Image: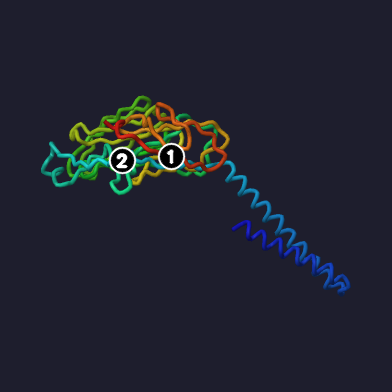
Amino acid sequence: MADSTCALRIGGAVLFFAVGSRKILWRRKEVLDMIHLQIKYLCLLVACTASTFSQIGWSAEWGNLKGRFIYDGSPPAPKKLVPTKDVAFCGKHKIPDERLIVNPENQGIADIVIYLRRKPSRISPVYDATATAEVTLDNIDCRFEPHVQLVRSGQTLVIGNKDAVGHNTNFTVFANSLPNSLVPALGSFRAKLTETEPRPAKVACNIHPWMSAVVVIKDHPYTAKTDKNGYFEIKHLPVGENMQFQFWHETAGYVRKVTGAKAKVSKKGRVKLNLDGDFDLGEIKVPPAIFE
């Protein structure tokens, strides 16, 4: 849009210059009016050009990474979990086994985590607004929602309970201090996250042992999880910087032995990239054996 607007204004400037050169014998007032208009269009042209180069500079500084993970085999049938505690309440809900979800229509794998292993030298300012935001992990219908939550150190994790029964939330973390707290019915508590975690942290409810979740805590915003169709995107990554990304899944651990990626993936499910703009890893096929 900026380019087309500039083109129109440049065309207008050229037209005025051409008319001015042919009408040089006009009366003095008309000539002065023409000069004023030419100066006006020159000013517009300079401002438009500066704006365009500013936009080009912004887009050249950051790039997006995307891709898709698919199950390279017949999708497993969805499983349901059977409550063994607080059955009168939890038994009223259909509780899916979310430790491996494959879309039967397109083989997309949900909740594969993709994260930058180390904090880059610079982070896009578009993430400043959410640097200290609150992020929610709820207990609802005797399951965690969302099943995989992405958090940045500096943010606050709000653990809520929408159920009529109590839960507790037990985090397997190494760097942060998160209490194994009882969350009463319709209650909540807040936990300030200050450190990056080396790996995604598993979450459990010791009262209801079928409940599980994953929280990814990094000291930067460059994390993503695949949607129900297997797609992911990490936006506004710094270009011209050596970066290494990790593929991880709750059941498989490191997502390895994959095929089809448009970049080399290591035996530990890692890929090294140095972006010069947007990059599509393509359709990444995951062997069923790593989930067994």
Query: Of the residues under marks 1 and 2, which one precedes in the sequence?
Result: 1
As drawn, is 2 to the left or to the right of 174?
right
> How many dots with numbers?
2
Percent coordinates x, y for residue 155 in the rendering: 41, 37
Q: Tell me how far mark 1 sits from mark 2, CA to CA.
A: 16 Å
Q: Residue at x 38, y 30 (%)?
A: 257
Q: Which amino acid, by three-letter code, is at mark 1? A: Thr
As drawn, is 195 to the left or to the right of 163?
right
Residue 19, above or below 149: below
The residue lying toward the viewer, choosing from 96 and 171, is 96
Residue lying furthest left: 88
Q: Residue at x 30, y 45 (%)?
A: 103
Quarter of the image that includes the N terminus: bottom right
The residue lying toward the viewer, choosing from 177 and 279, is 279
Residue highlighted by disc 1: 132
Quarter of the image that includes the C terminus: top left
Percent coordinates x, y for residue 65 in the rendering: 48, 41
The residue lying toward the viewer, choosing from 120 and 180, is 120
As drawn, is 16 to the left or to the right of 152?
right
Q: Residue at x 30, y 34 (%)?
A: 288
Percent coordinates x, y for residue 68 in the rendering: 40, 42
Residue highlighted by disc 2: 137
Instruction: Name which quarter of the figure residue 139 lies in.
Output: top left
Foreground disc of the pair 1, 2: 2
Q: Residue at x 88, y 73 (%)?
A: 25
Instruction: Name which quarter of the figure residue 101 lies in.
Output: top left
Within-10-Å neighbours for mark 1: few <14, some 14–19, many 20+: some
Q: Which amino acid, by three-letter code, is at mark 2? A: Leu
Q: Secondary structure at mark 1?
A: loop
Q: What's the colour scheme?
A: rainbow
Percent coordinates x, y for residue 185 in the rendering: 20, 42
